[in-house]
Amino acid sequence: MSKLVQVLRGEIWDVIVDARRGSPAYGRWEAFALSETNHHQLYIPRGFLHGFLALTDGVLFNYKHSAYYEPSREIAVRWDDPTIGIAWPLDGTPIVSDRDGSAGRFADLR
């Protein structure tokens, strides 16, 4: 499903990864700063992975989805997968959810 995201409070570093097999940009990532002050929104097309790093405490998101959320269709890829090589702007060790911490590799996506 596609998504439109916006930060209503705080600031994040938002990343998308092209996971569309056959795409010339397959496996490439791009990052965007979204914050309550810049008011930017990010459209994430179907077939893209999406992740973010909260740069401030108390981040509040607004998500709009193109379809109803279906947990069984959700996939996750390790945030630090070396195949993708995202240059996260980290200051120390990140706090990662259990789901994201145990996610598989990008190469194993089907």
Image: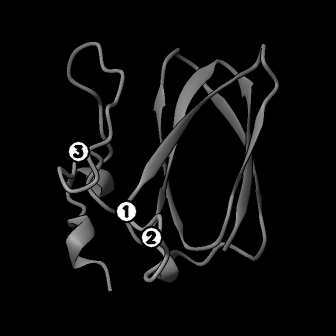
Point out residue 89 in the picture as x, y percentages from the top left corner: 36, 21
Residue, disc 3: 80
Q: Residues within 10 Å of mark 1 (few under 14, many from 20)?
A: some
Mark 2 and mark 1 in contact? Answer it, CB < 8 Å.
yes
Q: Is residue 63 shown left or right of residue 108?
A: right
Q: Is 107 situated above or below 73?
A: above
Q: Is residue 85 shown left or right of residue 64?
A: left
Of badges 2 and 3, the one in the foreground is 2
Foreground pick, 83 / 4: 83
Q: Quadrant of the C terminus?
A: bottom left
Q: Is 29 situated above or below 22?
A: above
Residue, disc 1: 27
Q: Is 83 situated above or below 36?
A: below
**Residue type pointed to by label 3:** Asp
Name of the residue lying farthest toward the front = 24
Which mark is on residue 19?
2
Q: Tell me the SS state at disc 1.
A: loop
Residue 80, quarter of the rendered image: top left
**Residue type pointed to by label 2:** Ala
**Residue type pointed to by label 1:** Gly
Please give the name of the residue rendered at 69% of the width and 37% of the height, measured from the top-left corner: 61
Q: Tell me the SS state at disc 2.
A: loop
Mark 2 and mark 3 in contact? Answer it, CB < 8 Å.
no
Q: Residues within 10 Å of mark 2 (few under 14, many from 20)?
A: some
